[in-house]
């Protein structure tokens, strides 16, 4: 198997590598070494599933949505606090906001990037999928609070 399979491109190289691993698994030479017990997933099945990225494809849009909601939350929070409409509810982020907008944005977006990276690489784990669902639900509540704050600030809610 040539090493340059990964340098051709992520999708092509990974598919080529997975097909080579599958051919190695089905050959008679390695059949005894790679046979899996009942209920235990074989190593080659895990590698093939990781290379095809089945769960990754399903989670890429929600992960991007989570990051977009994080960015919107950061900018709306800055706008509401700087205009005196409300105060920041998170005390750690409020102290960062006291230092200025840039430290607040760096911390807020840094945590968002870290979270999305962990979810992206852990897409095959049930914990990541459940955590993503919970995070999206929390951000929907946060966005509704922002909308409610905006409506109250402009006199539509009293």
Image (tube, helix red, strand yellow):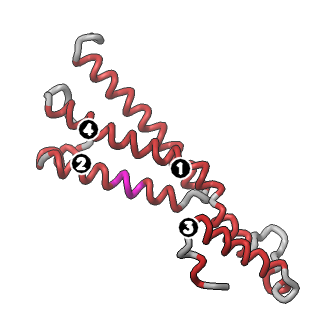
Decide if residue 17 is on the left or right side of residue 145: right
Question: Disc 3 to disc 1, how far (Cα)?
Answer: 16 Å
Question: Which of disc 2 and disc 3 is earlier in sequence?
Answer: 3
The outermost residue toward the front is 8
Q: Are marks 4 and 2 in contact (CB under 8 Å)?
A: no
- Residue at point 56% right, 75% down? 6
Picture coordinates of residue 78 (x, y %)? 21, 37
Part of the protein shown in magenta: 111-115
Question: Disc 4 to disc 2, how far (Cα)?
Answer: 8 Å
Question: Which of disc 2 and disc 1 is earlier in sequence?
Answer: 1
**Residue tagged 2:** 105
**Residue tagged 1:** 60
Residue 91 versus residue 105: which sits nearer the camera?
Answer: 105
- Say if 58 sits above or below 121 in the image: above
Question: Disc 4 to disc 3, how far (Cα)?
Answer: 34 Å
Where, by quadrant of the figure, is residue 1 drawn? bottom right
């Amino acid at each position: 198997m040539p090493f340059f399979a990964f340098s051709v491109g992520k999708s092509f190289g990974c598919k080529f590598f997975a097909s080579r691993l599958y051919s190695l698994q089905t050959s008679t030479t390695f059949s005894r070494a790679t046979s899996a017990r009942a209920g235990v997933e074989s190593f080659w099945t895990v590698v093939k599933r990781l290379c095809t990225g089945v769960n990754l494809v399903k989670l890429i849009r929600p992960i991007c949505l989570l990051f977009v909601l994080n960015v919107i939350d950061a900018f709306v929070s800055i706008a509401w606090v700087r205009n005196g409409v409300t105060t920041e509810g998170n005390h750690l982020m409020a102290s960062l906001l006291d230092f200025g907008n840039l430290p607040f944005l760096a911390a807020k977006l840094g945590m968002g990037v870290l979270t999305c990276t962990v979810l992206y690489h852990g897409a095959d784990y049930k914990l990541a999928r459940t955590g993503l669902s919970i995070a999206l639900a929390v951000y929907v509540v946060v966005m509704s609070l922002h909308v409610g704050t905006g409506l109250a600030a402009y006199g539509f809610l009293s």
